[in-house]
Image (cartoon, grey):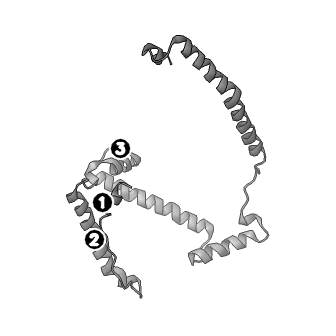
Amino acid sequence: MDVLVVAESITAVEATALKAAAKTAILDAMAPAYDRILGWLHADRDRVSDTATGAWALPDGAAFYTYRLQRMTTLPLTAEAIHQTGLEEVARIQAEMKAIQASVGFEGSLQDFFTHLRTSDEFYFENTVQGREGYLQLARDFIKGIEAKLPDYFGILPKGPLEVRRVEAFREQA
């Protein structure tokens, strides 16, 4: 408010009155509301169970959980085996990414490399007609490569083609 006084938008007396009104509003209205929220949060925290619960806590819960895993994955694996596979896959992918990072000569952590990939202009098409068309052509080329391999994995293929096209100009800014 002192800036407004210096700019002569308000007087020093008006600034003092506004500061007093703001202080009153904060102390009389906002502070009690925050106190109520904090009280609720503390009470809610006190009602939280000390032990985690899940399907395993039900009668025959472990068997039910194993059944659901096998039903959803269609594999006869335990939760521990699935978890271990996940850890191994993360380690494998990270090793591949570190190898790529080294092959391009990037110095820094893997996280820094990911940030570089996300933010560096060299990995994006220009926001021009030519850039958009370049992106669309790359997408079309990927689709052609994928479509050539679909019969190897699927017995029934889509009847219609997959089409990638530019968003209409009037929708681009939406």
> Residue at label 3?
108
The percent coordinates of residue 152 (x first, y second) are: 37, 84
Label pair 2/1, CB-CB below 8 angstroms: no
Location of residue 13 (image quadrant): top right
Q: Residue at x 31, y 44 (%)?
A: 107
Element class at badge 3 = loop
Q: Does dot 2 land on a helix, a strand or a loop?
A: helix
89 and 36: which is toward the camera: 36
| Kind of residue at disc 1 | Ala
- CA gap, disc 3 and disc 2: 34 Å
Q: Disc 2 marks which residue?
A: 140
Tell me where residue 33 appears, x and y as whole percent: 70, 34
Q: Nearer the viewer, residue 80 or 124?
A: 124
| Mark 2 → mark 1, Cα distance in angstroms | 20 Å
Q: Quadrant of the C terminus?
A: bottom left
Is residue 144 found left or right of 54 in the rendered image? left
Residue type pointed to by label 3 = Gly
Measured Cα–Cα span from mark 3 to mark 1? 40 Å
The three-letter code of the residue at mark 2 reads: Arg
Q: Determine whether, in the image, residue 38 is placed left or right of residue 88.
A: right
Q: Quadrant of residue 46?
A: top right
Give the numbered dot on residue 45: none
Residue located at (62% from left, 71% from top): 78
Q: Is residue 97 visible?
A: yes
